[in-house]
Image: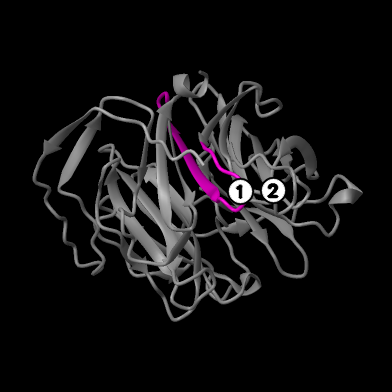
Amino acid sequence: MNKTYCVLSILVIFFLTNCNSNGKSKNNISTNQTIKIDSLPVKDFVAGSNPPFKECHASTLVKLKDNDFLVAWFAGEKEKNNNVGIWLVKGRPHQWSSAKQIAKIRNDAHWNPVLFQSPDGKIFLFFKVGKEIEHWETWVKTSDDNGDSWSEAYELIKGDKGGRGPVRSKPIVLSNGTWLAGSSHEYQGYHVFTDRSEDKGKTWTATPYLKLGDTSLQNKELIQPTLWESKPGYVHMLIRSELGIICRSDSKDYGKTWAPIYKTNLPNPNSGIDVAQHTDNTLILAYNPDNRNDGDRAPLLLGVSFDNGITWPHKLNIENGKGDDEFSYPSLISFGDTVAVCYTWQRKNIAFWMGTKKDLLK
């Protein structure tokens, strides 16, 4: 396993930050120092050298307008345990706030946080609560001050079981202003769908379950779609599967209806994936390349596509490994010519990698 980390030259800029205390929550996350990254790429652990939990998984991130990041994940004794909650840090590489539990609704397992920043700057934290996946509830907290304080949690769809809104990857804002989230249910089979909001997240409407384009997909695990829009109204998804490959579907009407799911040539061991889109429509895909169901979750690659996800000629290995090593469940964002990704590192910490498009094409 290659654990060599990049040596960086960094300029530390100290400044005082004013904490916006608006009485919304007792869970405050802030940092009083920031750094300017002079050299990329960079790797780092967000939860420090001695994390205050035994296991962690399923991270998510957003970049704030002041160039800090929020990173969230679930952690506790072990996945599915009742003591698992949602944790959060704020900051930049080598300058993260202390990891703190930011959401714990009740004494049930919490799962799959998803951070999303709306166009007006409000931060949404979606997460699942429930002992078993088929009985998940989707809960939400919001922040109007870049994650320094948070609202009380509320159910996205009150009384819903199975999970609504984003199941693992970030929602996207379409060219017509619609918010679109990739979703899936794991009750009486596996079902992929999307959730749409046309009122800035106040209400959500689920599409019908996507149809299958191949009989070999019947009764197979198809979950956790990740989305992008290639041109106005043309939306696409890549889907995690148990077939040893990634599957796909496409929409021509802003995600209202979808073509039947079909297979791609991209390998994947039934592990989480995520897509980000550069402003020039170049796509970046974070994934594990093993082609066996429940195969190795190492190494972790960033693939690059210039033809709307048809081919992926460039691949950068950002984390090596083999066998029981786990570098998985990446969350990926793109801004300018830069990409940032966080991911599970051996279930012991959350790793963060940031680099430029040039780094990906070397």
Q: Which residues are magenta?
A: 319-338
Instruction: Determine if residue 85 is in view.
Output: yes
Left or right, 20 with respect to 285, comes to left
What kind of element bears circle 1? loop
Three-letter amino acid code of the residue under disc 2: Pro
The residue that appears at 70% across and 35% down in the rendered structure is: 252
Instruction: Check disc 1: other Cα within 10 Å, few if <14, some if 14-19, many if 20+.
Output: many
Residue underneath mark 2: 269
Left or right, 191 with respect to 321, comes to right
**Relative to residue 207, is residue 235 depicted above or below?**
above
Task: Give the image location of residue 85, x and y in percent.
Answer: 42, 69
The residue that appears at 41% across and 75% down in the rendered structure is: 105
Q: Which mark is drawn over residue 297? A: 1
Task: Give the image location of residue 2, x and y in percent.
Answer: 48, 38
Colouring convention used in this rendered image of the protein: one colour
Please tell me whether residue 335 belongs to the stretch shown in magenta.
yes
